Structure formats: structure tokens, C-alpha cells
Image (tube, rainbow, N blue to C red):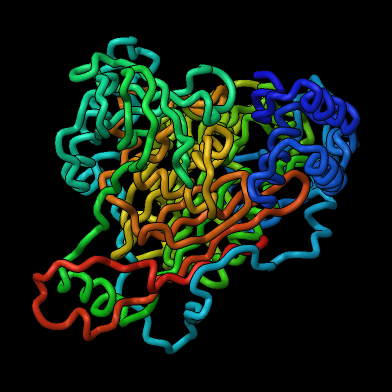
Amino acid sequence: MSLSSLLGCNDAAMTKRYSDLATQLDITDSDLANNWEAFSLSHDDADHTDANFALFRTFVQGMVKKNGPKEDRKRPAQVMGSPPPHPNVKAAKTESNISATMVGSSNTARISTSPGPGYEDRKNAGQIVAHLNVSLPEKAVMKDGDIGFTSLAPVKVDGSDYKCNVDKKYRYMFTTLPERARALDQRLTKMAGEMEKKYGMDNVSAVGVPCTEEVQVVGRICNEAHEGRINKTSVVLEGDRGNAGGARIDLSLEALKTYSVFPGQIVGIQGLNPSGRKMVAKKICEGVSKPMVKSKAGELMKLQYDDRNGQPLSVFAASGPFTTSGDLEYAPLVDLLAVASRLQPDAVILTGPFVDANHPLCKDGEVNLSDSDGNMIPVSYETVFQEKVAREIEIFFDEGPACPTQFILVPSLEDAFHDNVFPQPPFADRIKGGIVADIPGGEGIKFGTLGIEDIEDVVKQKQPQTHKRVHCVSNPATFKINDVVFGVTSVDPILALNTNQASVSINRMERMAQHLIQQQSYYPIFPAPKSAANLDLRHLDKFSMDVTPDVLILPSKLAPFAKDVMGSVVINPTTLAKGNTGGSYASITVHPMKREELEGDGEIEMEHKVAERARVVVQKI
């Protein structure tokens, strides 16, 4: 994609200035565009003017200086091994003679694998960067003798409650064009019916039918240009195949004071279309949300008071990459687990990438481990996950066998060892339990497994409860922890919306999160931007929302936030590692409802109202 398309800039002279700036700073067009998006968000959706260019140049120079020059991040260095960080646990694994030291491909210059100075020297650890309802109290750390909860917070991740979850691998790249068209049309027809019912839209006309009076239509927003960012002059409206034959007409938004549209969005329009070729919008309805979750009062009483003695639910949420760009030591993840070990949240939600396919030490397609003799052994990406993610979680439970924390792992399209398709199935061993191959230098290496089953084995040996402690879910996923419904995806729809919408509105971040809820989808953009998401439309229902989640976690490269959006708590914790330094994670505390609200008729269904009782803090690792 051209730089002008990435920036949404139609001025050739201005685009040339941006190109020269990228060359001067030795960064790619994509990096420059990402910095422009960050700058634009913090400057009220800035236009491409001379004044804004001067401000942006200062901004991007500061960002490049902060992250360090490119050549410094990739400088060759002597590889130095280090003793295992947990010798008591490592020594117990006598079957493995591989150390946890990771290095890059032996065919390329090696990169130091010790934690980068940028991360070690960070000054802002613990700094709060976003928050919601901070007037509510934090969860107290339990002490010996305190009356705690009587059981683990139940985590329901199966498809019995939410049919949108992918529960197993499926065959992809088999969707035909007719199947894609049919899936899109069925979604349009379904949402049109819901919008007509909720908003009382009577006598809805077909898109493209001329009329001298104001009419109401429902259709899908498309970009006439097919390529590049949509703008107010390239918006077209597409009707369904049944009533409109898939007709497309130009859509004028000039009469609207505020609007926010993007390709794939299903909208209701009230306006004039005298010619049948161009509609002038007077009002716009940007979708219809699914209802908030309701539960019986008796069930809420049991979950919040009978089982937990009125103690709040505590959840951490963090997103990959989990290691800095200069090494594979996973220091930010280790530090997060140390915080979790001390505070003992009920659950930790980790979204990928866990082994980032774009990491400098992984993107060449080869990663090496050193054995106990210092010999370099090429290993699979799965082994990296075993050593640096599964092993650290195993250590977490080994050092605190009574800890009530459960882990929920959400994959990413950028995970080097997993299917690159959306919706994405949950993590699973290629060979259940793995096998030990009889190859030179590979003694003790398990192939075909992620090592998650080993974690469960350790837990069951020391924990009388038989609950699963590590839950692998799909991407996206809708699941329930205790009484709270969570929705999570790692595909970054916020960034995709930010770079593919035409809008005149305030509270832009909130508006983008609102789009997902109103469109009942974790990824409502169609077609997806290049290199953003490989959509399998045959499974379009698997990235739809069955309900509006109480908490919606949307990790994004954009600025962190925590907001109440249409009754749902929407959180962007950003990434745990950013370049050579640390990122941030979210800490969520959901307090119980007042006991008197739940007493009485236990059959009465009540909304959870989590946005009123949730305390959210996004802070630096």
C-alpha cells in the first residue's frame, strides 16, 4: 500500500514531505503511518497541514529517539549464557538438558539475549496510564487467618453458553466466493431486521430505488475507491441481494453534524434519493447492540456472596509481545507473574502473540536454543512457547501451589506457531503430550506440544482442587469468570477502525469501541486491511457477539484506555513489551452488587451493571 493511502493524504507534495521524513529517520512507511495515527489521536484527528506536519516531525523524532536507533536494536553481540532463573524447578526436570537461553538463527548475526537496558532502566514502572472508577477500593491482599472464598471463581469457556466461540481447529482457505457473498448478505439481512424492530423503522425501502420523499434504507458502507482510506467523498451504500439486488449508490454525509463510518458497517439511513443513484443522508443509525447479560438474582447471590463471602473478583489482562525486541528472555512476562504471585488475582488473561512472528529473533524462521554444553540446537516455535511461557506458568504454580489464580490464553494471528486465520481456534498440541525424538542434540526435547498439559500435571499434584488452571480459548472469545462475562480479541480492531474510517465526531476512541458493540462483531471491518486479518467469512458467526460483554478487552497499539461504553467496560491494556522497554497491563477489580439488591425473589433476572462496580487501572509493568 502506498504511503499516501497509509496516511490518508491526497496531497502529493505533502506525501513527498512525509516520505522524506521517513527516509531521514530511517523508518518504514508503516512505522511512519503508525506514528501519524498516534499523533492524530492526541491532536483531535489532525489534518495534513504545514503546521501539523511541523508538530508531527517533532513528535516522531522523539518517538524514534525514545525507542533507540534501528541499528542499535540489531547490533551483533557476544552471546552469553546465564544460569536458569529458578534452579530448584529446573533441576527437577532432569529429562531436559536444554537451558532457557534463547538466541537467534545461527545463520545470522546473533543478538544479545540478556534483558535490554531499555527495560531494566525504565523509570515508570507502576505508573498509571489509564483508569476507570478509581474511587472504588482495590482488592485487599489476603493474609493468613482471613476468611476467603470457598471455591475458585468458575471459568466457563465452552460453547454451551456462547456459540460464537471456536472450540476446535477447522479447515480454512476453502471458502468460495458465493459462500463469502452469502455470509455477508445473511449478516446484512439479520441486522436490518433487528434495526427495524428496535428503532421502529417502518416502510424501509430498497437501496437504489428513487423517491422524491424522505425514505429509510438499511445497507452496508463500502469504499468506492476499493483501496486506501475511506473519506466522505468515497462513501457508497450497498443494499442486500434479496430486495436491492446488491445495488450500490453514492452516500452524501454533508448534512450530518457528526458521523463515523467505515467499510463493512451496517447502517440505517434516513434521507433523500430522488435520482436513485445518490442518497443525501439526514439521519444515520450506526447499528444495534445485543442486550446486556442478565442472570437470576439467586445465582448472583450464590456467586458473589455464598461462594466468595462478598469479596471482589480480581482479573489481570495483558497482551503480547511479552518480551522486548532485543532478546527472548521474556522479562516483562516474568515480572507480571511476580506481581500476580503477590496479589493473587482470580484470573490472568493473556492474549498473544506469545511467540511473535515479527520479532527480530523469530522472523527469519529459525530459533536456536543452547543445551547444557553450550551447543546451539535449532528448535521449533512451540519449544520457545514451552520454555518461555508454559514453563514460567508452571513455575508460578510450583512456587505457590495454593494460589487461586487461573490463566486464560488467547492466541494471536501473529503467533508464529499457530493458524493465521480469523476466527482463530484455541491453542492445542499438534501431538497430544508431545514426543521425544531420537535426533542428535535433541535429547529431552518434546516435539509437537506446547507444554500446557505439564502445567496441569504439576497443579494436580499439589492442589486438592481438580479445576483446570490454564484455559485455552479461541480468538475472539466470549467467556464468563464467576458472574462477569468477558469478551476478548487480539486482532486489534481498534487500530483497523482508526485507519479505515471517515468521521466527524468527538471521543474518537469511545466511538470506535462503540462500533464493535453496535455492529455485534469483534471485527466488523470488511474488507479487512491488508496484513491485518485473514477473515474466513464461512465462520463469520464465530466472530460475532452473542451478547454485549460486561468487560470487553481490546489490546491495541494505540493509546491505552478504560471506558464505560454503552454499559460495557472497554479496556485497551496495550502490549506488555514495547520495543526495547516495558509496556502496560490492566488490573480489573469487580465488586459485588449490594446484598439487598439480590435478596428476595431469586428468580428475578437482573443486569450485571459491571460498569458501575468495576475498578480498572492500566499501569506500566
Q: Is residue 162 above or below residue 417?
A: below
Residue at the image point whose x is 21% and y is 33% from the top: 190
| Quarter of the image where one finds residue 432 | top left
Pick the front one: 597 or 590? 597
Q: Quadrant of the N terminus?
A: top right
Observer-nearest residue: 372 or 474?
Answer: 474
Instruction: Kindly tell me whether residue 420 is visible in this rendering.
Output: no
Q: Position of residue 94 (x, y in %)?
A: 60, 45
Q: Is residue 56 above or below residue 108?
A: below
Q: Quadrant of residue 304?
A: bottom left
Expressed as whole percent of the image width and height from the top left, the position of residue 141 reads 51, 80
Residue reaching furthest bottom?
Answer: 145
| Numbered disc total | 0
- Give above or below for 154 relative to 409: below
Q: Nearer the viewer, residue 545 or 233?
A: 233
Q: Could you say where residue 520 lies in the image, as x and y percent from the top left?
A: 32, 42
Q: Would residue 561 appear left or right of 517 to someone viewing this image? A: right
Task: In this rendered view, identify the residue nearer to me: 164 or 290.
Answer: 290
Residue drawn where x is 34% and y is 54% of the image: 549
Q: Residue 517: x, y in percent?
A: 36, 47
Q: Is residue 335 left or right of residue 164?
A: right
Question: Residue, x 60% and y 64% (percent of image)?
Answer: 130
State which quadrant residue 211 falls in. top left
Quarter in which the C terminus is drawn: bottom right
Q: Is residue 277 visible?
A: yes
Horizontal relation, residue 591 to residue 395: left or right: left
